[in-house]
Amino acid sequence: MTVLVTGATGTIGSDLVRLLSAAGHKVRAFARSIDRSPMAHLPGIEPFAGDFNDADRLRGAMEGVDVLVLITPSAPEAADQASLCLAAALKAGLRKVVRLSAIRADPAGPTENTRLHARTEAEIRASGLDHVFLRPNFFMQNLFMVAEAVRATGTFSFANGDGRSGLIDARDIALCLHHCVESDRWNGEALELTGPESISLFEVARRLSALLGRPVRYEPVLPVAAHDFALGAGWGEWLATLLRDYGAAYSAGWGDFVTGHVEDLTGQPPRSFETFASELLVPALKS
């Protein structure tokens, strides 16, 4: 089987490429800059430098491919990029699309990212291709965004208030994508992915304190304050608004749910927060 992975150098894409390589698949790894990536030298990997807006490169990327794993960045042009990729896939005669979507993708969702992913899901459904949509909850890896603040001050902030969410380790998302590439059992499904429990960031701070042996505090900020901070930091209006709207949604309990889909897909339970923190976050905080 030949698998095309877009966004192959991102957190989830790079994990997925490694998993597919280890399983013996031929993988075309599509990204803007891929040739110097460590994954370029893995068995079965074909680095393919390209841009979603380059129609010729997209056509070339699709040649001889069986399954497309469609990963796009959070950006205002994400749905347009996905449309271009889907058009190239249809022309090339691909069989299946595995789409990394967004939590509770919906045309009436609370964030622009939610709505853009809903648009892409609708286009994939209408294409007639076999497909699976995976919609992950709040990434545990988002905590790396505040690692420096935790190291320096012992505090961190998000705009999530006291809202609980089914935090998920991004490594489990990659594992779920891998299983959806290899199995057609879940074709036609849209699956919300979560970790094993729904917890607040106050609870995250408490558990981090225990693991680090020193106090860690979560100090929530209002969504509008998160917007203003991001704008001042040069993130741009679109990402600043996204941060504000996600904060408001999570504060209101939008992500407060747990599903069993990770274990359904992979045959193993999702990683706990303690596992993620012990293996990845705490070492980073102590470095």
Image: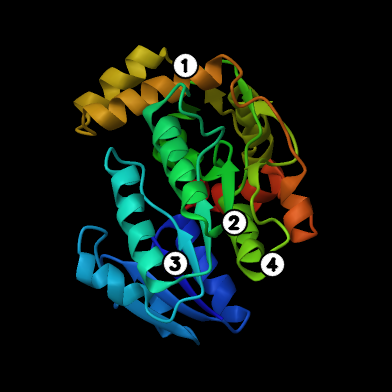
Residue 194 found in image quarter? top right
Side (left or right) of 30 relative to 172: left
Q: Is residue 143 visible?
A: yes
Q: Earlier in the sequence, mark 2 or mark 4?
A: 2
Secondary-structure class at tag 2: helix
Q: Residue at x 22, y 30 (%)?
A: 233
Q: Residue 110: percent from the left, percent from the top? A: 46, 21
The three-letter amino acid code for the residue at tag 1 is Ala
Q: Earlier in the sequence, mark 3 or mark 2?
A: 3
Within 10 angstroms of label 1, few (less than 14), some, or many (20 or more) residues? many
How many dots with numbers?
4
Side (left or right) of 128 relative to 34: right
Give me the C-alpha separation between circle 4 and circle 3: 16 Å
Secondary-structure class at tag 3: strand
| C-beta proximity under 8 Å, tags 3 and 2 | no
The residue pinned by badge 1 equals: 248
Residue 149 found in image quarter? top left
| C-beta proximity under 8 Å, tags 2 and 4 | no
Nearer to me, 8 or 134: 134
Tell us which disc is closer to us: 3 or 2: 3
Nearer to me, 215 or 167: 167
Within 10 angstroms of label 4, few (less than 14), some, or many (20 or more) residues? few
Q: Residue 280: percent from the left, percent from the top? A: 57, 53
The three-letter amino acid code for the residue at tag 3 is Val
The residue pinned by badge 4 equals: 183
Secondary-structure class at tag 4: loop
